[in-house]
Image (cartoon, grey):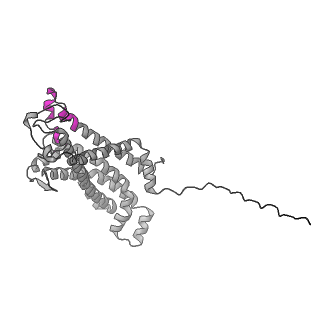
Amino acid sequence: MALTTDPPALIPQLITEDVEPPPLSLAQLTWRRFRRHRMAMLGVVILVLLILYSYGGALLVSETYANHNDLTIVLDAPTAAHPFGTDTTGRDILARTVYGGQISLLIGLTAVIVETLVGIFVGAIAGYYGGWVDSLLMRMTEAVLNIPQIFLLLVMAKFFGGKIPNLTIGGREFSGSVVVIILIIGMTSWPYLARIVRAEFLSIKEREFILAARATGTPTWEIIFKHILPNSIAPIVVSATLGVAGAITLEAYISFLGLGVRAPTATWGNMLEGAYQYIDQGAYWLWLFPGLLIVLIVLSINFLGDGLRDALDPRSRTV
């Protein structure tokens, strides 16, 4: 009897299908757009290096050394002992730029916090309520805008600069003029942000999800801070980022004129005070190194702001 065998079993073929990747979240999409912006990434690198220079350098040199006067080495050119040279009282410029960078960054960040808080409050109230509230707040905003900021800074810094005693925070002594400069810059820069926030609120408050929130009895504060404000965050972040560079530049302006942060506190701005008097003597290091640091930090923050503007733009096609 012949043995019969069953036909070989058919081996099913695996069919590979193209599986679409999951959609990107808003944070992932923003990061992808941002990292494609080469100048923004360069700005981030420069900014991180400057922060490490200012705060990491404090681990290598003390503030006492940075403020130490040595009349035997006045206006010494850059050497191995003093890579950035010395100033008119024999202080090491490298050490002073380390601690000066801390104060310049502190002024820029805290002034922008003041500017952002006031600008968001005024812009949100004006844009949400409209009517006479909007008219009153916008007239006040326009009044502040019509006052020359540099002029107001000079007058207020001159008037209040010497009336606030030095402050000791964390074992460090700060000139009282630091607080004055922060408040003046913050309280004179908010109108630009307020108008941006107002425009965003006027647009978003008429959308369907806001009308639905009102219809369901959602409290006003919740509509403002949980629904409208989060949807307005992109222009606020960009404006605040660029405001840091503006605050640092303004501090440098008035410090160069002798009305900014006062001794013993160093900033990159007040290190330039009087440096122009020694240009014809060849003491280029007095203005070159502090000025170069100001240029680098302003450029890096502007590059960062440009990248954030493009990355947070919902109409951007770059992915």
Instruction: Tell me the residue at 15%/34% (across/down).
Output: 275
Vertical side of 5 occupied by 311: above or below? above
For the image shown, how many numbered marks are present on the structure?
A: 0
Residue farthest along the front direction in this orientation: 1
Instruction: Tell me the residue at 28%/47% (across/down).
Output: 52
Residue 143, visible in the rendered structure: no
Residue 296 painted magenta: no
Residue 254's x, y, as percent? 17, 42
Q: In the picture, which quadrant includes the N terminus?
A: bottom right
Residue 161, visible in the rendered structure: yes
**Horizontal placement of 222 versus 136: left or right?**
right
Foreground residue, 115 or 142? 115
Task: State which quadrant residue 277 falls in.
Answer: top left
**Horizontal placement of 55 versus 227: left or right?**
left
Residue farthest along the right direction in this orientation: 1
Which stretch appears magenta? Answer: 265-290
Foreground residue, 219 or 27? 27
